[in-house]
Amino acid sequence: MVHPYVVNTINALVLLIAGLTAYFVTRAPAPAALLAPAFGVALLACTRHLRKHNQFVINTVTALTLIAGFTFLLYIDFEGGSWKINDMLYLLMGISCFVAAVFYTGTFLSERRKKDNTIYKDDL
């Protein structure tokens, strides 16, 4: 299983790049498109604490990542006839958040099954 701080860094970079792309590619950029890069910077700030295995931060990042994934999916315009670049980027950001949350949860479950923290022995 991949460590949570690695998944967090990848997810944060996806949110930064896709969010900035969604903001600068459109003709009339919406201020809501800057929420993704802001959230990506916040996730990058949590990476150090995830590396130190702070359970409160891991649980908070997991919950906020799920909320962000649902929020990005709400921005997709399903009523339009064709998919625009913004819709594709919001879908990418939502899927990235959901995959990251699955990895966070999977790491937590495998750590609980082992009960001796051998998953993180290589980091300490």
Image (tube, rainbow, N blue to C red):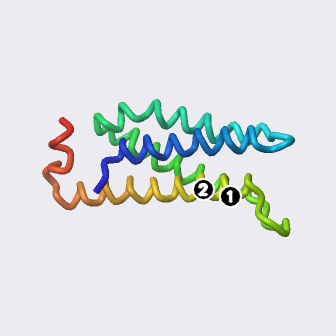
- State the SS at label 1: helix
Left or right, 120 with reference to 5 = left
On the image, the x and y values in percent for residue 103 come to 38, 56
On the image, the x and y values in percent for residue 62 come to 46, 49
**Residue 79 picture quarter:** bottom right
Residue plotted at (85% across, 69% down): 81
Please, what is the three-letter code of the amino acid marked with disc 1? Met
For the N terminus, which image quadrant? bottom left
Left or right, 13 with reference to 52 = right
Please, what is the three-letter code of the amino acid marked with disc 2? Leu
> 10 Å neighbourhood of mark 1: few (<14), some, or many (≥20)?
some
- State the SS at label 2: helix
Front-most of residues 8 and 21: 21
The answer to the question of whether label 2 and label 1 lie on touching residues, with beta carbons closer than 8 A, is: yes
> 10 Å neighbourhood of mark 2: few (<14), some, or many (≥20)?
some
Residue plotted at (49% across, 37% down): 43
On the image, the x and y values in percent for residue 71 come to 66, 52
For label 1, the residue is 88
Residue plotted at (76% across, 43% down): 25
Front-most of residues 20 and 62: 20
For label 2, the residue is 92
